[in-house]
Each structure stands twice: as C-alpha cells, then as structure tokens.
Amino acid sequence: MTAPDVKGWCPGALRPMLSGDGWLVRVRPRAGRLTPDQAAGIAALAGAHGNGTLSLSNRANVQLRGIREDALPALTEGLRGLGLLDADEAAEARRNILVAPEWTADDGTPAVAAALERALAAEDAPDLPGKFGFAVDIGPAPVLRGAPADIRIERAGDRLVVRADGCGRGMAVTGRQAAGAALDLARWFVASGGPAGRGRMAAHLERAALPPAFAAADAPDAPAPVPGPGLRPAGVLAALAFGEARAATVAALAALGPLRMTPWRMVLVEGLREAPRIPGLIHDPRDPRLRIVACTGAPGCAQGLQPTRPLARRIARILPAWEPFGPLHRSVIHVSGCAKGCAHPGAADEVIVGRPGGYATGRDTTAAEVPDDAPLRQAGDWRAPDMLLEDRA
C-alpha cells in the first residue's frame, strides 16, 4: 500500500495548501470567535473565490475549499480587511490556540487567550512544530480533552493548571501567570528535543522527563461531556453534517449574532434562544450523522483514495436500526479517505479507511492502524446494519 503524504504542517490563511479541489485556506478565528461581519465576510469570500464550501476542523478553524490559484491574492486581502490575518506566516503557524466555546465573561478565558496570543506573537516565542497547539479550557470542568492540543490550561478549583498533554499533573498558576507558564513549557519542549521526534507533546513525554515544576499540581480529572446541539447558556449550538456548510448557511448564521467555532463540528450562535430554521443545520442530538466523522475524501482531497461523504451518508441512513450502537459521546464511526485519519486521529469504535480498490475496516482502532491485509469492501456493500462490521460480537 502506498503511504499517504504526511505534510507535517497545517495550512493557514497565509500559507494555503493545494488539495484535490483547489487551494485550501484555513482561517484561525481569534479565541475561536467571529463577529457577524467577519462570518458574513468569510462566507462571501468563499463564494467569490472558491467552491462556496466551508468546513470546521477539529481545531475549531474555518476552512475555505476549492480556492482558485489566481484568486489567492484577492482572498488574502479580503481576510486582511476582516482582521483575520497575522503579521506573517511564522506568527500564524504558532497561533494554534483552541478555546473552550462556552466561556463566559467571568471565567477569565478571554484574558488568558489574548495573553497567550500576544506571547506567541512576540519575537522571542519558540519555533514550534506546525501541529503543536494550546488549549484554553478553564470553565468549571474541561471539555477539550478529546481535541488536539499539546499544552493545556485548565481549572482545578480556584486555581488554573498549565500541564503537558499526556501528563495528569501540571503547574498551578493564576490567570495572569498562565500564558507565561505555557510559553515556558513550550520552550522546554523545544530545548529538550521535542520537534526532533513526532513534534507532539504526548509522544515526547515517552522519552523525556518534565521539569518537576510542571508536575507538582493535580489537574482536574473529571472532564465534562461534549455537549450536543441545542440550547445552551451562551446561545444555541448548531451542528453541521460532517463539519461542512455552504457559504449561504454561514451567511444566514452570521445574521443572527457572533459565532463561536467548536472542535466538534458545531457552531455556537451567541445569545440565541431558539434553534435557527436554516437549511443545512442539525438540531437533533440523536441524528445519526453526528455519530460519523468523515473527512473530505476523494476527489476533494489529493490524499484521498476513496470517496468518504457518500459512504458516510449511506451509513447514516441505516444507523437508526443498529441497536448496539452506544451514546453519541462514546461511539464513533470514522470514515477516512486514507490512512492519515486527519478528521479523527484517535481511535474510533468503527473505522472505515479508503484503500486502492475499496475500503478496509477495523474496530476500536485508528485509520493508521487498520491492517494492510484487511479485506476490502465496496461502498455498495453497506446496505444493512450487519454490514458495518461482521466481527462486533
């Protein structure tokens, strides 16, 4: 089997990536929030310069797909006018900050996120790997444990804890100290050879011991469940099937208020008190499409070996009859176009991965770990619940 081309870096607005359907431009909203003007502007730019499709990544970034090469300069200027660009590519690459979406004005999240952003933009900020990221998760209980991050800022009672991903302990800090401590931990990662490995903190901790100061305090050990779509204290969470939306859907949401991006393929509309009646949104937490994670797949992704979205929709139609399927937050089907598994890097209950000539399947594993010699199936094979996996005894 031909190994997928692992880039080792994430696209941005200043460093787009060529994909199967054109250029991919990734916008990183500051603190995960877009004003109505910014959201409407992004939707307009996606329609004018691309294929009119936007998607949410598992880092709560907004991706504009199918951008024409000759339209890249105009798109860049449009994003600059919306206040969505960094000073340069290096600053943009470092600003991988994931913020718990349901923050409040009183929990300190905006101040910590802003301080961390300033620290990462400073001249003495460490040169971090492209996928290295930070999570600001300081609500009553952490909700971002399943989202990718290498340094996590969480709340433990009346204090904050800065900890390395992969370690259950960290450094107790105040809100004003959190950004500085996070940068110190990032500098240790670089100085101790982290980028020379896989470039991720948890993998680095398998061969390097943390400084004692970053393993002195207990971190919270009881994360909150990921919320489903519906009414929330801060507004309404609306889900997007497979994290994708048309520009018109985003423009309609922008007319309702500021938007907070999530790593769960959902958008929180601030202040809204009832579900918006906009085509393309999912409001029922039992909707089977929410149980399926599916990347762009072929032909939209140059790495995709098979289409993913048509198969994901086919499976969604038969899922309601599958009684053994568990609760949303515990059971996931991952349909991946290749072994990279970008949309869901962790293990899933059921994995379907594209291969030359068909799809291989696995259970309680990742796309990368499905055996090379696994039997192949065709998309048409999935006609009934018992066709998902025959070995789930």
Image (tube, rainbow, N blue to C red):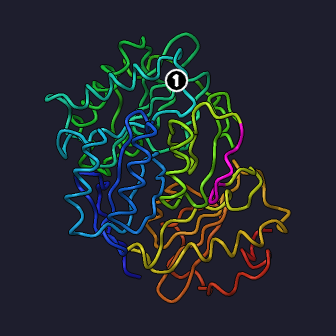
Q: Is residue 228 left or right of residue 195?
A: right
Point 77% across, 67% down: residue:
319
Q: Is residue 355 left or right of residue 192?
A: right
Residue 231 image-quadrant placement = top right
Compared with 343, 298 (above or below) is below
Looking at the rendered image, the quarter that the C terminus falls into is bottom right
Q: Residues within 10 Å of mark 1 (few under 14, many from 20)?
A: many
Main SS, magenta region, reads loop
Compared with 137, 323 (above or below) is below
Pointer 1 residue: 138
x then y, percent, for residue 68? 28, 70
Point 55% across, 56% down: residue:
249
The residue nearer to you, when weighing 261 against 82, is 82
Compared with 227, 66 (above or below) is below
Point 23% across, 69% down: residue:
69
| Mark 1: secondary structure | loop
Q: Is residue 53 left or right of residue 314?
A: left
Looking at the rendered image, the quarter that the N terminus falls into is bottom left
x then y, percent, for residue 295? 50, 65
x then y, percent, for residue 388? 72, 74
The count of marks equals 1
The residue nearer to you, when weighing 205 against 37, is 37
Q: Which residues, given as a range, are shown in magenta?
A: 274-281
Outermost residue, front direction?
Answer: 255
Point 57% across, 33% down: residue:
270
Residue 320 image-quadrant placement = bottom right
Outermost residue, left direction?
Answer: 123
x then y, percent, for residue 173? 42, 13
* Magenta stretch: includes residue 115: no
Compared with 251, 335 (above or below) is below
Residue type, numbered disc 1: Ile
